[in-house]
Amino acid sequence: MTRHFLRDDDLSPEEQAEVLELALKLKANPYDERPLAGPGTVAVLFDKPTLRTQASFASGIAELGGFPMIIDGALAQIGVRESVVDTARVLGRQASAIVWRTHEQSRLEEMAAHAGVPVVNALTDQFHPCQALADLLTVREHRGTLAGQVLAFVGDPACNMGHSLLLAGATAGMHVRVSGPDAYRPDPTVLTRAQEIARSTGGSAAYVGDPVEAATGADVLVTDTWISMGREAEAEARAEVFAPWQLNDALLAHAADDAIVLHCLPAYRGKEITDDVLEGPRSLVWDEAENRRHVQKAVLVRLLAGGEPG
């Protein structure tokens, strides 16, 4: 059966731990796994702007011995010029795996249902699971463990990063708090799913409206842009609504003394995060950006092997 990575809870707690362990090994020894030697092709599709995702997948696929076939979504016009189903059937015969950065999660699910090869979510409006894995790897590297760590996400809890950190953090046994304006609560089905996972891992998942309450005692503070792709017209209104959730020195002061700061980038300095915090000693955003490559390689290795543990 073909395995896919479409959302964070596609990995069990055991599988997630194995992926992170493999990512650490590949970070230390980048060429130890070569499942794409030949080279095999991985189709990498972009319907949304990209920098880190394209760079990390292209370099990672090459390190696995493969060829990244980059496809411009504006040229392919998937769902307009050609249906998702027909595209999946074409690419499934040309590539060993498909990586797609697109809009609705349903498009990704339709691709996975018809491709016949592993499909990886490189970002949708609902989830960003590869980024969440990179965040977890960064936390593990710098704090030594994941279980029991308190992670607070401040900003727009209804965005893809808020959703992915709820699911991925709960899977890792972390205590995840997402904080933002009441009108921007996370999808209740995602929060409920995260709480269900947390009951089996010893973690927790919660929406906490007050940013100070969310940040208090946190081991990890995370933020993301207030204006997700496709919502640029809301920029001015969102800047006013989200101002109390800015990740600044005052908010950071409520976190643990050795708390770390993450941001998946691009960062809008002076908006969701101040320059002082982004460039400060607590910030690990550049390690976090690099770690995209290592976790994505680990995911591809697992999927290409059939997803079996180990």
Image (spheres, grey):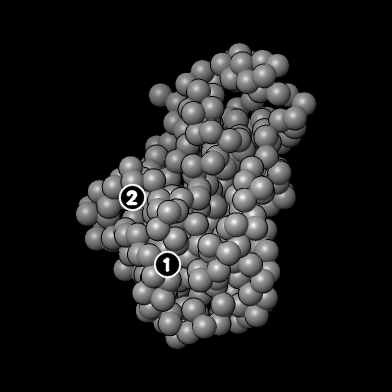
Number of other residues with Cα within 10 Å of mark 2, as a class: few under 14, some 14 to 19, many 20 or more: many
Picture quadrant of residue 290? bottom right
| Residue 85, x across and y down, in percent | 56, 16
Q: Residue extending furthest left?
A: 199
Query: Which residue has dot 2 on it?
Result: 191
> Which residue is at a point 45% across and 26% down the rendered structure image?
2
The C terminus - image quarter: top left
4 vs 258: above or below? above
| Residue 246, x across and y down, in percent | 55, 70
- The tag on residue 183 is none
**Res. 262 visible in picture:** no
251 vs 246: above or below? below
- Amino acid tagged 1: Ala
215 with respect to 235 (left or right): left
Mark 2 or mark 1, earlier in chain: 1
| Residue 237, x across and y down, in percent | 60, 57
Secondary structure under tag 2 reads helix
> Which residue is at a point 47% across and 33% down the rendered structure image?
4
- Amino acid tagged 2: Leu
Q: Distance between the residues labelled 2 and 1?
A: 14 Å
99 vs 21: above or below? above
Query: Which residue has dot 1 on it?
Result: 152
Q: Residue extending furthest right?
A: 75
Number of other residues with Cα within 10 Å of mark 1, as a class: few under 14, some 14 to 19, many 20 or more: many
Secondary structure under tag 1 reads strand
247 with respect to 217 (left or right): right
The N terminus - image quarter: top left
